[in-house]
Image (cartoon, rainbow, N blue to C red):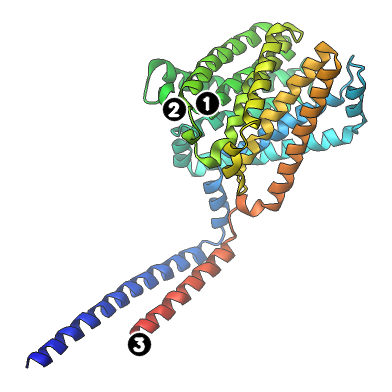
């Protein structure tokens, strides 16, 4: 009796897990079948919905880089009083190359703007979450920075036209609104005061004000330009000191986001350009900002290990390299025009060539890895779901046996 009783207990212990596994497997199979039915019933929406879900303001790094590169090419090929032989090299570039680049920047920016507008309309909760994120909120300045740079590089609209002035107001008002919201929180120590949320992307708010100041100075609006410049440079000093105190090591940002450290170069570079447009010449103040950006550039280049992990796999954050380099090259051009020396022009050529090379490489790499930026099609998703369902069905049959 004891032996038979023991054998019965063993059978219960062995069989009960089988029953549990079969029940769980059936439940998973049922859920997966429901998911497949849901996907097949909404074949029109998944592609657009998945794009809008994945798309965020950080993708405007691409348009910022292209628009700043277009402004760089415009300044390089336009006629000026600089007769140095190194400067004459850039005039060999045909104007059609600049027009193509400007058109590409316009197309990219319009496409990204439309996608983000749809994201705001259809996925407003995601946009709200992005606004509350300490990094994502700073990239809300990126679209307006891109439009201002594209406006300044436009071959069709000049600063003395009414269209230029209207576009300036359209692009600057959102920057001022974001300034009031973000700077107000920093000042009053609200939920996100600066000491707790400061990161290199915080400098985008500064860059937005300084780019607006340069555009206003190009129109001859000196008072407005000085107003925007003072707003930007005052908060740049605060952000710069805070970042120096807070970012004491390499682990302040995830490895994927470390390319944004190059924004340290962008803020002083655009400050030198803005003050040059306001004062009418590349004076001592502009040179000080340029030398600061040049020093920060050398400091970052001397630390390749900081960016090694972020370069293992392509990501949209790679575009954070191009935008600040273009601004640094623009400042180097103005410096060379003022100094008129061989070393200054050699520096201008090196930085401009490096900026163009980085932008071209990023365009090529992005084109090759476009599948990373865009979500997979609904057909492939359904195929993977059916494959997974078949696998679960096979497992269920094996367990039944």
Residue carrying label 3: 401
Dot 2, how many residues are within 10 Å of its Cα: few (below 14), some (14-19), or many (20+)? few
Residue carrying label 1: 202
Q: Quadrant of the N terminus?
A: bottom left
Single out the residue that lies furthest toward the left. 1
Residue drawn at point x = 67 percent, y = 31 percent = 323
Tag 3 secondary structure: loop
Mark yes or no: residue 57 visible: no
Estimate the spatial distance between the alpha carbons at disc 2 and disc 1, rounded to whole Å: 8 Å
Estimate the spatial distance between the alpha carbons at disc 1 and disc 3, rounded to whole Å: 61 Å
| Horizontal arrangement in the rendering, residue 101 relative to residue 18 (left or right) | right
Q: Position of residue 186 (x, y in %)?
A: 43, 19
Which picture quadrant has residue 10? bottom left
Mark yes or no: residue 217 visible: yes
Q: Position of residue 236 (x, y in %)?
A: 55, 17
Residue carrying label 2: 197
Residue drawn at point x = 74 percent, y = 43 percent = 361
| Horizontal arrangement in the rendering, residue 314 relative to residue 104 (left or right) | left
Q: Earlier in the sequence, mark 1 or mark 3?
A: 1
273 vs 113, nearest the viewer? 273
Q: Is residue 211 above or below residue 325?
A: above
Which picture quadrant has residue 257? top right
Tag 2 secondary structure: helix
Q: Quadrant of the C terminus?
A: bottom left
Estimate the spatial distance between the alpha carbons at disc 2 and disc 3, rounded to whole Å: 58 Å
Q: Is residue 125 above or below residue 367?
A: above
Q: Earlier in the sequence, mark 2 or mark 1?
A: 2
Q: Position of residue 42 (x, y in %)?
A: 51, 61
Q: Are marks 2 and 1 in contact (CB under 8 Å)?
A: yes
């Amino acid at each position: 009796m004891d032996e038979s009783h023991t054998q019965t207990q063993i059978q219960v212990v062995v069989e009960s897990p089988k029953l549990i596994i079969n029940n769980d497997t059936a439940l998973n199979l049922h859920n997966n079948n429901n998911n497949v039915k849901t996907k097949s019933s909404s074949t029109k929406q998944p592609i657009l919905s998945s794009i809008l879900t994945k798309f965020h303001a950080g993708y405007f790094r691409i348009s910022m880089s292209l628009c700043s590169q277009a402004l760089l090419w415009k300044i390089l090929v336009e006629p000026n009083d600089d007769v140095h032989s190194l400067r004459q090299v850039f005039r060999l570039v045909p104007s059609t190359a600049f027009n193509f680049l400007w058109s590409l920047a316009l197309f990219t920016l319009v496409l990204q703007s439309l996608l983000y507008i749809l994201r705001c309309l259809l996925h407003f909760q995601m946009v709200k979450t992005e606004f509350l994120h300490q990094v994502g909120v700073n990239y809300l300045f990126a679209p307006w920075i891109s439009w201002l740079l594209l406006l300044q590089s436009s071959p069709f609209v000049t600063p003395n036209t009414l269209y230029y002035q209207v576009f300036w107001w359209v692009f600057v008002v959102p920057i001022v609104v974001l300034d009031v919201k973000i700077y107000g929180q920093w000042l009053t120590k609200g939920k996100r005061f600066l000491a707790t949320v400061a990161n290199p992307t915080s400098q985008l708010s500064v860059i937005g004000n300084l780019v607006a100041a340069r555009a206003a100075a190009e129109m001859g609006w000196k008072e407005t330009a000085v107003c925007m410049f003072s707003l930007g440079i005052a908060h740049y000093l605060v952000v710069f000191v805070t970042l120096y105190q807070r970012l004491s090591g390499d682990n302040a940002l995830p490895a994927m986001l470390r390319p944004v450290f190059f924004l340290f170069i962008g803020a002083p570079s655009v400050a030198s350009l803005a003050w040059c447009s306001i004062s009418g010449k590349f004076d001592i103040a502009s040179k000080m900002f340029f030398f600061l950006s040049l020093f920060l550039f050398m400091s970052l280049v001397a630390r390749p290990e900081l960016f090694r992990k972020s370069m293992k796999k392509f990501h949209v954050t790679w575009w954070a390299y191009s935008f600040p380099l273009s601004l640094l090259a623009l400042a180097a051009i103005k410096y060379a025009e003022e100094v008129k020396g061989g070393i200054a022009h050699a520096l201008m050529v090196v930085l401009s060539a490096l900026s163009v090379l980085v932008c071209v490489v990023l365009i090529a790499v992005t084109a090759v890895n476009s599948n990373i930026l865009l979500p997979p099609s609904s057909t492939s998703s359904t195929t993977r779901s059916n494959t997974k369902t078949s696998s679960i069905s096979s497992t269920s049959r094996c367990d039944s046996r």
